[in-house]
Image (spheres, rainbow, N blue to C red):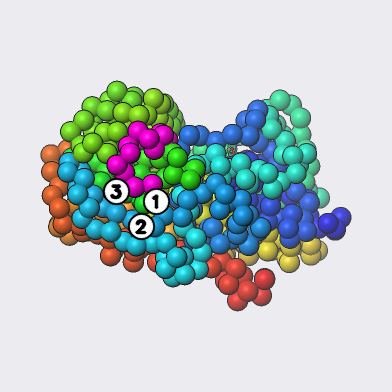
Amino acid sequence: MSENQPHVAVVGAGIGGLTAAIALRRAGLRVDVYEQAPVLSEIGAGIHLAPNGSRLLVRLGLGKRLDEVAVRPEAMEVRVWDTGAVVVRQPMGDAWQARFDGPHYTLHRADLHGLLAEAVPADLVHVGHRAVAVTEDVGGVRIDFAHGASVRADVVVAADGVHSLLRRPIAGDEPAVFSGTAAIRAVVPSAACPDLPRDALLTWVGPAGRLLAHPVRGGRETAFVAVVADPTDGGDSWSRPADTAALRRAFADWEPGVRGLVEAASEAGHWTLYDREPLPRWSTARTTLLGDAAHPMLPHHGQGASQAIEDAVTLAACLARLGTGPSGPAPALRRYEELRLEHTSRVRQGSLGGGSQRLSTTDAPPASASPAPPSPSSSPRPGGAGMEELVRDVTWVQRYDVEAELATAGLA
Ligand code: FAD
């Protein structure tokens, strides 16, 4: 590791910040990570890791650990909400992996976060450090923390998530866009729903909303997310514990497989779903944004984490090749932003009306481009609309190889 390479301070040890630390160190840069939480941890929820993100983690040397903790589903199924009948089944497995040149994993967020944390030396991750201000000068940048300490670095990467404090000097206080929907997430033992397959992504669409479930931890546990209408704009508190009794009531007349899932959830998280319009820029001379801090998006494409991973690999390539010139890191940060801003804006746009929102058990036309809350009065019947549209939506996102783009840009 060369002393001439920039010293990078990453703020936030989430999926994006930790991947950035791994990629930056691999590219030969000096890195420290500052995390506000007193210990590294993640919420109890599942996550899809799409091939565009997973293949980058595999190339960063994490494929073996991913295979140990994640599941590669064999199929996607859409089921009728009250009978459980399968209306459409899209095979995945090896053919899907070959088609997208990478595995599609489902896993527990804590397992993904844990394997990323293992790949960063513990003495480089400073927990209990809540960044409150960043000040740039000609020779570097200073981060001030809430407990009074400060550090200097050459570059600051703000990977401080959807509520990013550090994005404000760059983005201003622009309002979040409220979707009128919420996601309720939990992980339960798969034994609670013995009739559901342990190797498939399942979606039911019904009167109370939409419920997606997938296996984690070798199929021993099942993660689910229920997307429901939620007219209450929660203001700043985007997430909170869910009311599990209300969840059970909302899904009480659904098929036994769904009831088994929601009844087994002794606790669950409630996320009011917001996103933000794309920013015109992400960087100043020495500070840049990464992951949700740069481009929060609705989760219907299952792409937030994978986009953060693509950001991390791109930033590392740009800083390693362009970050040491007489102009300091500014040209590298500008190039990073050029390579990522338009692409992530397109993915964010797609997440407004595409992805899992396409799936329906009606034979009505696919959902429109705006995110309409599910109607409580509708009672969907079999038809299986939307799988072709979903596959079309995800194809260009999941085939995209950011390292091929970097090679074309002369940055590989
Ligand atoms: P985070 O993972 O949020 O990490 C931010 C970190 O910064 C945290 O550790 C936080 O404590 C720390 N931090 C914050 N402020 C400070 C500060 N001032 N100082 C120091 N540290 C700070 N994505 C997918 O790819 N697939 C999915 O299936 C998927 N499902 C989703 C379902 C739902 C309901 C939601 C809401 C999102 C989903 N996402 C999914 C999106 C994905 O979770 C995010 O895009 C991803 O976690 C972003 O990573 P990040 O590192 O940018 O932010």
Q: Residue 354, how many percent across, how many down?
A: 32, 57
Q: Left or right? Give the position of 129 relative to 58.
A: right
The mark closer to the camera, 1 or 3, is 1
Q: Secondary structure at mark 3?
A: strand
Q: CA distance from mark 1 to mark 3?
A: 13 Å
Q: Kindly tell me whether residue 222 is visible in this rendering.
A: yes
Task: In the rendered view, tell whether residue 11 sits above or below residue 36.
Answer: below
Numbered label attached to residue 199: 1
- Given residues 321 and 242, the one toward you in this image is 242
Q: Residue at x 57, y 38 (%)?
A: 165
Q: Are marks 2 and 1 in contact (CB under 8 Å)?
A: yes
Report whether 211 appears left or right of 2.
Answer: left
Residue under the point 35% across and 29% down: 264
Which amino acid, by three-letter code, is at mark 1? Asp
Q: Position of residue 267 (x, y in %)?
A: 40, 26
Task: Decide if ligand 1 comes within 8 Å of the CB at mark 3.
Answer: no
Mark 2 or mark 3, earlier in chain: 2
Looking at the rendering, the stretch of residues picked out in magenta corresponds to 183-198
Which residue position is annotated with label 3? 203
Residue 75 is labelled as 2
Q: Are marks 1 and 3 in contact (CB under 8 Å)?
A: no
Give the Cα distance between marks 2 and 3. Answer: 11 Å
Q: Is residue 169 visible?
A: no
Between 184 and 145, the residue placed more toward the observer is 184
